[in-house]
Image (cartoon, coloured by chain):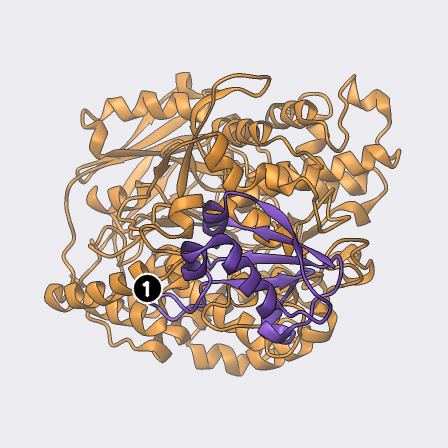
Chain colours: A purple, B orange
Amino acid sequence: MKIHVKFLATIREITGKPEIELEIRPGDTVGAALQALQALYGPEFKEATTGTTAGGIPKVRFLVNGRNADFLEELETKLKDGDVMVLVPPVAGG
Amino acid sequence: MLGGYTGKILEVDLDSGELKDLPLDEEMAKMYLGGKGLGLKLVYDEFRADMQPFDPDNLLVFATGPATGEKVPTSGRYHVVCSKSPQTGTVGSGNSGGKWGPYLKFAGYDAVVVRGISKEPVYLSIVDGKAELVAAPELWSMTVHAVTDELTEKTGNPKKTSVACIGPAGENLVPFSGIMNDKYRTAGRTGLGAVMGSKKLKAIVVSGSQRVEPANPELLKERVAEAMKKIKENPVTAPDGGLHNYGTAVLVNIINESGAYPTRNFQEAYFPEADEQSGETLVKKYLTGKYGCWGCPIVCGRKSDVPDGPFSIRNTEGPEYETIFAFGSNCGIKELDALIKANHLCDELGLDTITMGDTIACAMELVEKGRIPEEKLHGMNLRFGDPSSMIEAIWRTAYRAGIGADLALGSKKLAEKYGAPELSIAVKGMELPAYDPRAIQGIGLNYATANRGGDHVYGYMISPEILGLPLKLDPYAVEDKPKWTIILQDLTSVINSSVVCLFTSFALGLPEYAGMLAAITGFDLDADKLLKLGERVTNLERLMNNMYGFDRKEDVLPKRLTEEPVPAGPSKGQISHVPEMIDEYYAIRSWVDGKPTKEKLKELGIA
């Protein structure tokens, strides 16, 4: 099955693409999709999507169909065919 | 004198032409700090419940705070208060960056109070402690950029000069015209420009170099170093962080993908073409540089250039996220160059971009639903998705030309006039900013309760609900929203009274603000005392609005947002639950039906 993955701001600068379709398996989670993306885009992407910043802020948040995965099951949030997953770095206000 | 203050307020009487120096009352400074708090108190001391917006004694107060012009991050801002807003009928209030605030201080004054109406157009000059009113009929009708250039030269020291002024929209009393400074910065909302225009005051020029010392410079240095460390580490405010790299426009995709990007007059909350007007696209196509206000390490301002095409505009500043939404998705328009041009036009004419864009959006829906007849448009295709009509509508509004005369009413009176009041998306007559409250509950509660109308910065709940700062709150939940809305609203009252930039609050909290302000002023301040001061400021503003007749019945969102579910996109099916949150909000505030109790007012020391 396929999900749409969108990259914003600094993460988009690394991937060079605003969005892709990602092939995943039934039952795959946000965590599994992240691992697949990290394998696809290499160490710079992995660094930008792992852990927290110096100030302790998570380096990436995930929206799944518009919902922040932190309020679903975080990395254990299950994905289904056609879902939209957005990778959001901590960048904004205004 | 207290640290951080010049100790002087300039009183300007435009009826008599008399200028007077008044001492800043120390007790007033301790209770209200400066900026918004000081402005509100000065207005309150002469308050009249039957005030009308263009009465001579509708006071217009420009106020700095103790942090303004000090060696403190983001100390370049100032606040403006007026007794009665022509847009909302509440107390008027606005805040702006650039460098005007510090230069008023360096020119020798903490604040300027303007009363009366001049017989002919004048500008106020405050240079090195000397103030004078100068007759200037030749300046009337000049656009903001032209008059700024003209007056900047006159002080003989252009690099240390700043000009605050109105454009043709303020002169023409458009009720959502703003006060502009340094060409592209604005105290935009609640129609402060129209109040200035009604007084025939075209501009205030400030220039000077009298620095004001803090009470405890060594301690301030330490506390600023701690604050700067936090600002530099935070990914939003860091020197290579989100705001610096992308500007506020970086919110376009984030908010759109959250299903909260208002589209076509808040009919929808997802705009498929959003990426074409995003911060990412702005960087790729039109960005030529960055702009920072005086004393700011964040530097979120944009410099843009559209070299050719139907919406060409050379070497301008902006656009901000709010402007992109108001003229973009909310008008069904995707073309970013048209939005940059629209922004520039609003700067030249002196118009609030949020209200202007939202009013055009309202007009577009009125046209599409057959409420505004074609004959009234005289050929304008004022429909969603038409960028050239959107741009034309802006100058028509400033000059009240054709349908522009109706647009100049603002969306509330416009929609009422054409028999569809429900199509105005506003609170207390001020149009809503760039977050659909059906997808983000707390910002909706803030919109409904903000004293000056539909306002996002009043208590910026986007910070916890979308950015997870200072803590994570679920945007769909109602739990804890009243409590956090109140904390952020009172914190913002502090920020607007200090005066520093709201954007520092992504990185800093009350302990840091209290630490710096205590070192500047010598006041006994900690986090709790400072928040109490903020609560006092919020309540004083609310009290005056109550006396104008505002209460619970105006603390409401339009029915579209509480009764019509989002039709499509990531937030499909959601509505705003403000009606379920408002009672808890009042209970925590000790307000009854939107009015502070006598006990609360006594506790806060408001007479």
> Disc 1 on helix, strand or loop?
loop
Q: Is residue B400 above or below residue B560?
A: above
What is the crowding at mark 1: few (fewer than 14 residues within 10 Å), some, or many (at least 20)?
many
The total of numbered circles placed on residues is 1
Residue extending farthest left: B218
Occupied quadrant, residue B447: bottom right
Occupied quadrant, residue A76: bottom right
Chain ID, mark 1: B
Left or right of B166 on screen, residue B68: left
Viewer-nearest residue: B283 or B443:
B283
Viewer-nearest residue: B128 or B76:
B76
Q: Is residue B489 visible?
A: yes
Residue at 46 percent across and 37 percent down: it is B283
The image shows residue B549 at horizontal and vertical percentages of 65, 61
The image shows residue B1 at horizontal and vertical percentages of 15, 61
Residue at 39 percent across and 65 percent down: it is B494
